[in-house]
Amino acid sequence: MATETITKSAVEREKRAVLAAPVAEPLSPATKALIAGLLVFALVAPFVLYPIYLIKVLCFALFACAFNLLIGYVGLLSFGHAMFFGGASYFTGHIVKVWGWSTELSILAGTLAAGLMGLVAGSIAIRRQGIYFAMVTLALAQMFYFFCLQAPFTGGEDGIQAIPRRPLFGIIDLRNDVNLYYVVLAIFLFGFLVVYRAIHSPFGQVLKSIRENEPRAVSLGYKTDQYKLLAFTLSATLAGLAGATKAIAFQIASLTDVAWQMSGEVVLMTLVGGIGTVFGPVVGAAVIVTMQNYLAGFGEWVLVIQGAIFVVVVLLFRRGIVGEAMAYAERRRRREEEKKAGD
């Protein structure tokens, strides 16, 4: 009886330690300055760069952040996230163009639809682990792809075209690309802050413990399947927000948005930027979209060039661009501390 009491006490202490672990280190002055600089750049960017290019970067950056929440902090590799991105795109485009809903309600409805799809798909997929989880998500995504190909309201191979950009809240004219950019920027910042808050919270600490050692998390009394399902649903919802925003911005929802290549693309964005880092998916999305835009003139050689760049990135930046930068900064900080201690 005494042994059982001691064991329960030990489990409770460890459980409290997981929840009480520091969720985020204080930002250094250099990091704060960098964030402030990025915000200033984001505000002036549409007057320097092409707004549509920036909008595409922001949409895919939000998509990659949503995906990174799942793979980087839960350890679940999904090959079917295009289902939520493209599904929200189709749903939003249809209800704006056919049902005549307002822009804000259409984006909200598309986002909620993606969340519901994530809840259903996650309930099926989280019963498996590792490669089996990835294959289940891929199978579900392919089923949804063929549904979009055959369903009458999706437009088949033509997709839903000429989606209207109705004024946001009846006030903001989205036909102006600069206005549209700032709206998309606000949506991206909202989604980014949701992800940031999720990973730097007790909920995020539990997700990290599941990623590191799920049996141990189970032994502490956590219902890991519920946490994984919640993370999967949240990731799908944010991916849907990115897809719904893209449908309005580019006025089209097509099979490209739900194809398996799109799922592979978001994996590459996360890998290039850095899995499990906050800003990695944003950097990865910017790199991939920039390559797609500025290498398009090479025609068939673009895939060869992209492949060579990916090989170089994987060999030189194994943690991703942001991951390697963080590792370098950490090594430099330790050397300075050791030097001060030696003095």
Image (cartoon, rainbow, N blue to C red):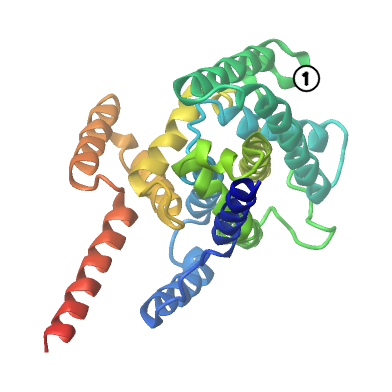
Residue drawn at point x = 68 percent, y = 43 percent = 248
Q: Which residue is mark 1?
A: 153
Q: Which image quadrant is residue 222 in?
A: top right
- Classify residue 236 as left or right of residue 80: right
Q: Position of residue 165 (x, y in %)?
A: 73, 46
Q: Position of residue 232 (x, y in %)?
A: 63, 37
Q: Which image quadrant is residue 268 in?
A: top left
Give SS at disc 1. helix
Q: Position of residue 6 (x, y in %)?
A: 59, 53
Q: Which image quadrant is residue 332 in?
A: bottom left
From this view, report whether residue 71 is shown above or below residue 48: above
Residue drawn at point x = 72 percent, y = 37 percent = 115
Q: Amino acid at mark 1?
A: Phe
In this orientation, which residue lies closer to the viewer: 72 or 143?
72
Res. 71 in view: no
Q: Position of residue 279 (x, y in %)?
A: 44, 57
In this orientation, which residue lies closer to the viewer: 293 or 73?
73
Residue drawn at point x = 41 percent, y = 50 percent = 286
**Residue that lies at the very extreme toward the front in this rendered image:** 1
**Image quarter of the C terminus:** bottom left
Res. 257 in view: yes
In this orientation, which residue lies closer to the viewer: 191 or 276?
276
In this orientation, which residue lies closer to the viewer: 16 or 46?
16
Q: How many marks?
A: 1
Crowdedness of circle 1 by 10 Å Cα count: few (<14), some, many (20+)?
some
From this view, report whether residue 12 is shown above or below residue 225: below
